[in-house]
Image (cartoon, rainbow, N blue to C red):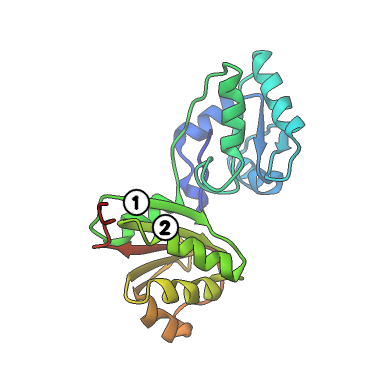
Amino acid sequence: MIATPIGNIEDMTFRAVRVLREEVSCIFCEDTRQSKKILNAYGIQLPSYSLHSHSPTARIDEACKRLLNGENIAYLTDCGTPGLSDPGSKLVNAAVNSGIQISPLPGASALTALISAAGIVQKDIIFAGFISKKPGRRINELEKLKQYEGIIVIYESPHRIHKLLAAIAEVFPENELVIGREMTKMYEEFIRGTAIQIVSNPELVKARGEFAIAISNTGLKKKSD
């Protein structure tokens, strides 16, 4: 399970490059076009097979069959660490159930990159990934997250970022936010303020690039029965 850059191609680890060059016979990946950009950047030639959220279970079975036949394969997500908001966990689950050894190659992750730059002094982190596109369900999911004390991290695309921020302002109006946009890329920026402050100034958040949002949720410990 190989972590890949979340934007800056130089964030590929030495170990990941070596393993891809020397130890695997093929890769399964979320998007072969994205993965080939990485392979080409490092002069690596490997057969690539897509394994995304809509792939049939037969594709996972194919990967496990290769492993059981003695091959070493790698799984790459579009960007970041496999198993976070991608099909990597399904492959790992199937492999483990087949008695196959899993080896993680850590590296870039939007979750940890945001936390490292947020400056929110809390030890608990709740990772929510991408929440629902539907307005009512989106609010319900945020309300459920409100019961947790810690840093809540959510991912979002540029197409829905302002709708998500409006929903966050409805549920967490005075909570401090740190928004990471285009992290590790040329136009990387971090936007800080309360949810209401940010929503009241929509020009602060350009709807371009990928987003990771940290919500500081403090002082909300659940009452004991």
Q: Do the numbered discs 2 and 1 sit on residues whose CB atoms are within 8 Å?
A: yes
- The image position of residue 191, as x and y in percent, is 38, 72
Residue drawn 52% across the image and 24% down it: 102
Can residue 48 be seen at all in this image of the molecule? yes
In the depicted structure, whether residue 222 falls above or below residue 36: below
For mark 1, does the 10 Å Cα neighbourhood hold few (<14), some (14 to 19), or many (20 or more) residues?
some
| Residue 184 seen from this side | no
Q: Position of residue 25 (x, y in %)?
A: 66, 24
Could you tell which of marks 2 and 1 lies nearer the N-terminus?
1
Is the residue marked by circle 2 packed among few (<14), some (14-19), or many (20+) residues within 10 Å?
many
Q: Position of residue 105 (x, y in %)?
A: 47, 33
Above or below residue 104? Residue 171 is below
- 118 or 20, which is in the foreground? 118
Percent across and percent down for residue 158 are: 58, 69
Q: Tell me if 180 is positioned left or right of 40 in this view.
A: left
Query: Secondary structure beneath disc 2?
Result: strand
Above or below residue 97? Residue 110 is below
- Say which amino acid is labelled 1: Ile
In screen coordinates, is 186 left or right of 40? left
Total number of numbered labels? 2
> What residue sits right under mark 1 in the picture?
125
Tell me the amino acid under the disc marked 2: Val
Q: Which residue is mark 2?
A: 153
**Going 73% across and 33% down the picture, which residue do you hit?**
57
Place residue 210 in its image quadrant.
Answer: bottom right
